[in-house]
Image (cartoon, helix red, strand yellow):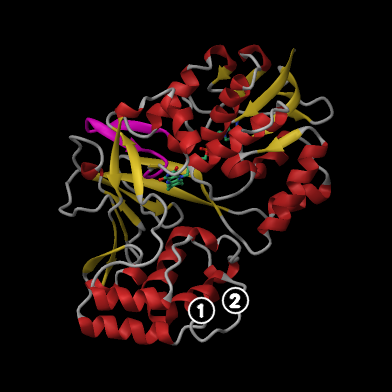
Amino acid sequence: MKKIKFIVLGAGPSGLAVAHALINAGHTLHDIIIIEQASIAGGLCRSEMVDGSPIDIGGGHFLDVKRKEVLDFLFRFMPRDEWDLYDRVSKIRIRGMEIDHPLEANLWQFPSEVQADYLESIAQAGCVRREKLPETFAEWIKWKLGERIAQEYMLPYNRKIWSIDPAQLGTYWLYKLPNVSFRETLLSCLEGKPMGALPAHGTFLYPKKFGYGEVWRRMGEALGDSLVTNCPVEHIDLATRTVNGRWQAQTIISTIPWTSWGDYCKLPKDILTAITSLKNAPIDVDFHAETLNSPAHWIYEPDESITYHRLLLRSNFAPGARGYWTEANATRSLQTDGVRFHNEFAYPINTLDKPQVVQKILVWGENNGIIGLGRWGQWEHMNSDVAVAAAMQLANKLSNKVEG
Ligand SMILES: Cc1cc2nc3c(=O)[nH]c(=O)nc-3n(C[C@H](O)[C@H](O)[C@H](O)COP(=O)(O)OP(=O)(O)OC[C@H]3O[C@@H](n4cnc5c(N)ncnc54)[C@H](O)[C@@H]3O)c2cc1C
């Protein structure tokens, strides 16, 4: 039995970042153990080489450039000159065309008759008529974008990606979506150019070689023997904070899904009930060898008769690559003999009661020396740059360092 300060469960971006940030804050490798079930670090951000070029096996991953402190942190492992910078080109397949995302800022790309149809529908939307903000995602879509965009794009697309009725999703997370006003939509049609706030990853970085997973692989490597791979969490003794009977910690930092915790230890009944209500969506990532003729980095596919919801045209962001990959909610995907990567935990689902449920679990955890961090520890749709920022913040807090 080894006694240490921190056991980190999971070596995805959150676990890797918190371990390195703790070291930056003055702890040493001897103070930390990271346990990872997979054979390499990186979690959803891992990449593999297929047909001579990378595939991001958890789906397409791009590094947002907004957070300088995160970029500086990551460039220590993969210097800036190993990345290419791109201006995002993302399209939506609709009415036999490929229209730039977000649709409501790019209706001007349709013939004018079609623009008029959409504008008429948005003009009747609840937000334009100053109706009350709805409580479910399904209602919000119609309230914000009107019936036509809701029925042709947003509702089918969201049914595909989550495989859950959007009426069961909340609205507390929608600040993450592009916010284009009706006025901006009108002006964009008049002036024939996009208007309104850009979506996330307006400008992004992607590695010149080996895919997005490379930076995380190197971060794992830099942890030496403190990273224990091929080591699934199997048992946790809550009273002593002992994991797998091998390591005992002052603090456990959990970046693994809470929904598995019931298998590792005996949880209080109310916490087990809370955990059981958390939902996640799985995805399959499938490789296709032909190269598509489109300038897009990725394309959204709302047609419900097609299983996948997004295509990633790696030939447009991985130098020298051929082919593309698709992402489908695994409950929808068909069997294949081709190259497929399955991810059981891809998307945390924003169910109506999730904020209260997560809060309850996190408070219980903190009272027991267990901190939830990252996509699964906080059950939140955070991108990897946000996950790193949260990990840096936590490491500072745990090290009593005041942030600069
Ligand atoms: C389709 C898709 C597209 C995305 N696109 C982007 C993007 O473009 N840009 C971006 O920045 N972010 C993107 N993200 C988000 C990004 O994947 C997450 O922010 C990031 O992976 C979060 O890291 P994490 O460490 O919190 O979770 P994860 O990456 O899920 O890591 C959790 C780790 O815990 C391990 N684990 C689980 N259970 C156990 C166990 N019992 N024992 C031991 N280990 C265990 C897992 O193997 C994994 O390594 C995307 C996500 C998806 C699904």
On the picture, is 283 further left or further right than 2?
A: left
Q: Amino acid at mark 1?
A: Trp
Query: Which of the 4 image quadrants contains residue 339?
Result: top left
Residue 87 screen position, x and y as percent: 29, 48
On the picture, is 26 further left or further right than 42?
A: right
Q: Is residue 178 above or below residue 209?
A: below
Residue 318 screen position, x and y as percent: 25, 37
Q: Is residue 28 above or below residue 386?
A: above
On residue 143, the disc is: 1
**Residue 48 colored in magenta in the image:** yes
Tag 2 secondary structure? loop
- The CA distance from mark 2 to mark 1 is 7 Å
Q: Amino acid at mark 2?
A: Pro
Q: Which residue is mark 2?
A: 134
The reply to whether discs 2 and 1 touch (Cβ–Cβ < 8 Å) is yes
**Residue 402 colored in magenta in the image:** no
Which residue is at a point 30% across and 27% down the rendered structure image? 81
Q: Is residue 211 above or below residue 218?
A: below
